[in-house]
Amino acid sequence: MQPQPKKNTALIGLIAIVVLAALVVGTIALQPKKDSSQNSDTNTSTNTPSSDTETSNPSSTTEQESGEYKDGTYKATGSYVSPGGNEEIDVTITIADGKITDSSVAPQAATRESLEYQDEFVNGYKEQVTGKDLATLMLGKVSGSSLTSRGFNEALDQIRSQAKI
């Protein structure tokens, strides 16, 4: 009867290793991305600023410089992990004098539940963004949607990089 306790010990050890590995992977997956511009396989931002201040002189600057950021309109795609998997939202921000003057968010959810949360976010985020400083803006929970804010904040980080003087 000696082999039985060894089998139980080995089984318990194996279960402990699997649980620990699952915790590590889960913790890593739920952390917000620090710099999504380094991962070009999953980053689908357009990285193309545009501006209404373009002139016909090709040597002139097409964007007005103000503070830390160039005035213009910028687009990026932010991603986040939801219980249903990876999700994305497209964000467009217009900047003037370092402040956000206009914005739009286009939901890109892969699941019905995520689309509902993204729609709630779209209906409630704008008043928390318009007129705010791009340099310091960071959204938390908006209209019951906290994960969509992570995607929005990731897109803001990309836009800050695009607009940086």
Image (cartoon, helix red, strand yellow):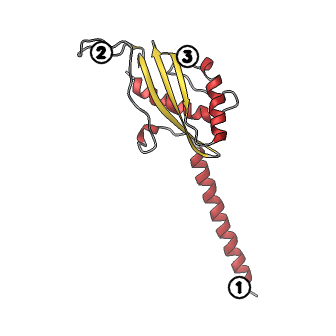
Give the CA separation, mark 3 to mark 1: 68 Å
Q: Secondary structure at mark 1?
A: helix
Dot 1 alpha-carbon crowd within 10 angstroms: few under 14, some 14 to 19, many 20 or more: few
Q: Secondary structure at mark 2?
A: loop
> What's the residue at 70%, 70% (across, down)?
12
Q: Secondary structure at mark 3?
A: loop
Marks 3 and 2: in contact by CB < 8 Å? no
Q: Nearer the viewer, mark 2 or mark 3?
A: 2
Marks 1 and 2: in contact by CB < 8 Å? no
Q: Which mark is residue 132?
A: 3
Quarter location, residue 108: top right
Q: Amino acid at mark 2?
A: Thr
- Where is residue 63 drawn, in percent x and y? 35, 16
Give the left or right position of residue 15, taking residue 154 as reference: right
> What's the residue at 48%, 30% (across, down)?
157
Dot 3 alpha-carbon crowd within 10 angstroms: few under 14, some 14 to 19, many 20 or more: some
The answer to whether 155 is drawn above or below residue 27 in the figure is: above
Q: Which mark is residue 61?
A: 2
Is residue 79 something that shows in the picture?
yes
* Quadrant containing the C terminus in the rendered view: top left
Q: Amino acid at mark 1?
A: Pro
Q: Earlier in the sequence, mark 2 or mark 3?
A: 2
The answer to whether 18 is drawn above or below residue 24 in the figure is: below
Marks 1 and 3: in contact by CB < 8 Å? no
Quarter location, residue 18: bottom right
Q: Earlier in the sequence, mark 3 or mark 1?
A: 1
Give the left or right position of residue 23, taking residue 133 as reference: right
Residue that numbered label 1 is attached to: 3
* Front in this rendered view, residue 72 or 161: 72
Dot 2 alpha-carbon crowd within 10 angstroms: few under 14, some 14 to 19, many 20 or more: few
